[in-house]
Amino acid sequence: MKNFQSLSDIQSEVSAGKLSVSELVEHYLKNIDEKNGRLNAFLSIYGEDAIKQAKLIDEKIHKNIAGRLAGMVIGIKDVFAYENHRLQCASSILEKFESQFTATCIQRLIDEDAIIIGHQNCDEFAMGSSNENSAFGVCKNPVDESRVPGGSSGGSAAAVASDMCQVSIGSDTGGSVRQPAAFCGVIGLKPTYSRISRYGLAAYASSFDTVGILTKSLSDAAIVLEIMSGADEFDSTVSNKKVPRFSDFKSKNKYRVAYLSETLSHEGLNPEVKEATLQTIEQLKSNGHEVREVSMSQLDYVLPTYYVLTAAEASSNLSRYDGVRYGKRAKSVDLEGMYKESRSEGFGEEVKKRIMTGTFVLSASYHDAYYTKAQKVRRLISQETNNLLDEYDFIVSPTTPTTAFKIGEFKSDPIQMYLEDLYTVQANVAGIPAISIPIGADNQGLPIGMQLMSKSFNELELIDISNQIITFKDQNG
């Protein structure tokens, strides 16, 4: 069976009687069986459930009552609740835990007849940039299995890129959808903070966490975004704004585009990534868009601000994993010992590092020096970013400073690992939407991604300009 690039391709063949949803699910399960042993993209596979659901959807299609996503097979990152299925957050602390409810965003997909085929590997509690922090082993990049797929949604990106599912749902706290999308050569969309309900998403850093989408096509990203978005009685932080018809994007507008000079002059930027980005910028100019180089004075402070604040929020959010209510419980003679040993044994090194950092910056002696100051800097970064977006429709940059790096290459160099988030964290700090689209490959065939950011709730135009770029590249090779 061919590698379908979009849901519309699938539904066309289903409508023509050339394909059934049951056959499609069998295709993906076969791919998982053949590839997952090497790639380690899926932690749990729900084959029986998927086959059963596919048969029901085939019947719905026959009766002409199927939902909008009939024929879409979806994998979900192991941070989303799915009722009566394991939720592990790629961590030992949640061993044998099964969710008692389904995340709102996942339920909305199911209600439109999407099929959930499994939970996908990720960095533990979404903390990482390489998928090397999973308690269940590293996921590998399907483009080159000696390299990481990116993180933290590495399994989600690898599964889409290797055709083990049509779409993946990930989470993006500082680039965790866009960075692996760039490394694996797929599309990664992070909507505006609050566009999609976070109910049922295991919390890492609550004021940064965003539900994200990984796809092969913009049309799939658009319809999935449309269906997942909107008000939710279970999430008081979600936006009540009317959800646009993202799936109807058809405009061919000319836009004002800015690119940050600092992102292209950074010493850590791979020359081939820089060249591919500059070529795409020239393409935007030649297609009639107004493109300007701009500077941002706060850019050097974005990454440290992000890591101070997310560590603080992680310290608070992960305090609930204590061995008492659910998950791993260490054997100990007293209550205090049980708390300490459960968390020491259950959490991995990276998670413990961030919890301790967060506890430090929240402590009475250092709260004002670190946490309060970082909150003030966050406000300044948001203001400067939004001021630029008042003048320009989009800000473009490389998604990542390098292409996918070797497994283990940065394991002993946490600073270099954190620098992989250099360009992506700005969108999360400011709460604005961003997307990574593939724009080429380096001389080793490793994918290169470009990031586009826009003002809050402007996903429709973000999808439009991304479509213009991808269409031009497809037509011109």
Image (cartoon, rainbow, N blue to C red):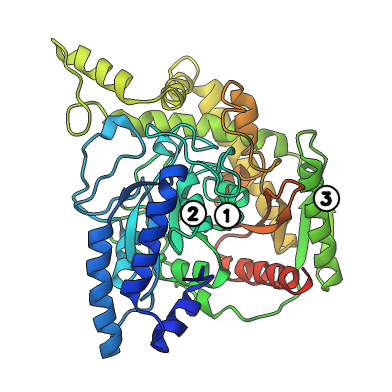
Residue type, numbered disc 1: Ile
- In the rendered structure, find residue 275 and report the number of the disc placed on it: 3
x and y percent of residue 407 in the render?
57, 33
3D distance between C-alphas at marks 2 and 1: 6 Å
375 or 349: nearer the viewer: 349
Residue type, numbered disc 3: Glu
Q: How many marks?
A: 3
x and y percent of residue 73 in the render?
38, 66
Instruction: State the residue position of label 2.
Output: 193
141 or 90: nearer the viewer: 141
State which tag comes first along the sequence, 1 or 3.
3
Residue type, numbered disc 2: Tyr
Quadrant hosting residue 70: bottom left
Relative to 441, say whether 411 is above or below.
above
3D distance between C-alphas at marks 1 and 3: 26 Å
State which tag comes first along the sequence, 2 or 1.
2
- Left or right of residue 468: residue 345: left
- Residue furthest top as drawn: 333
11 or 462: nearer the viewer: 11
